[in-house]
Image: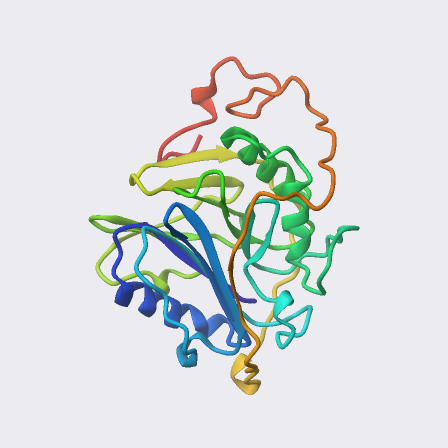
Amino acid sequence: MCGICGYVGKMSQQQFHNMLCSNETRGGHAWGAAWKENNQIMYYKEPGRYAISKFKLDETDLMIAHTRWATNGKPEQNENNHPHVGGGICLVHNGVVSNKHPKQKTECDSEAILKMIISHDISGYYKIIKAIKKTCEKIKGSFRIAVVSTKFPDRIFIACDEADPVYFGYGKDWIAFSSEEKDLPKRCTATQAIGGRIYVIKTDMTMEMFKFKIPSFASKWEYDWRKSNYHAPHATYSHFGDDFDFPRQKEDDENECEQCLNTDCNSCDIFKQLFTDG
């Protein structure tokens, strides 16, 4: 099942620590995070529970995180844990998918989503939106995803299907998201995301929303992660660049609008809105 969470803005270290500890009820086999540091994207991941980890996350104005309950790929092998990185993209995923990618290097099903995204041209902001849109429309399974890019380290791209909504929380100086409403900081304004949408939240406290077609949905999973307590000393701490490890695929919609991604668009404002259902 797993869980994802994160924020943009001025959230205290203690507030996010509480969020991630609460999020860990969805999986304690491994955890990981990616954050903005000196205008770069850094990441860290390790097997075991966040609550007992010796690694401490510093305050930043952008963070995504993941707590893992392993369904595919042993958590002791840290490459199976989240975030998955490559092509200048860093991704965390909550759900189970059956997609496979020929360039997949790990046993984790979530890596296929990353490979699908970076097989497209992601050289610009709206091109990243388009790549995420096309990927979401081809996912076979359930998903909540959060993505950060080295090209745009001031924003988080978030998408979900209808059965697995993301929850947003709004504070005075921050916007947070999580797999469950209970994980959000107390006394914040909370809303449930609409499935079939890509939300982009930025460090300047603005949000944009884009549509995609809802794909097929996989079955729910039940688990009790407390019966297993994976923990190993193998961790990964690094920053990553913009290298692509395989050619991008040819785009099949040459006439798509660069902004709203619709082939028959006459007005981008129909498809790009703020806090509203298009």
Residue 137 occupies which quadrant of the picture? top right
Q: Residue furthest top?
A: 266
Give me the residue at 71% from left, 36% from top.
Answer: 248
Report x, y in % for residue 125: 50, 31
Indicate the quadrant containing the C terminus: top left, top right, bottom left or bottom right. Answer: top left
Q: From the viewer's perspective, is 91 left or right of 10?
A: right
- Viewer-side residue, 237 vs 256: 237
Q: From the viewer's perspective, is 189 left or right of 154?
A: left
Residue 84 occupies which quadrant of the picture? bottom right
Give me the residue at 43% from left, 78% from top.
Answer: 53
Indicate the quadrant containing the N terminus: top left, top right, bottom left or bottom right. Answer: bottom right
Report x, y in % for residue 77: 65, 73
- Viewer-side residue, 196 vs 152: 152
Please say whether residue 264 is visible from this viewpoint.
yes
Report x, y in % for residue 82: 56, 62
Q: From the viewer's perspective, is 245 left or right of 242?
A: right
Please say whether residue 163 is visible from this viewpoint.
no
- Viewer-side residue, 216 vs 139: 139
Report x, y in % for residue 251: 70, 28
Give me the residue at 24% from left, 55% from top.
Answer: 188
Residue 227 occupies which quadrant of the picture? bottom right
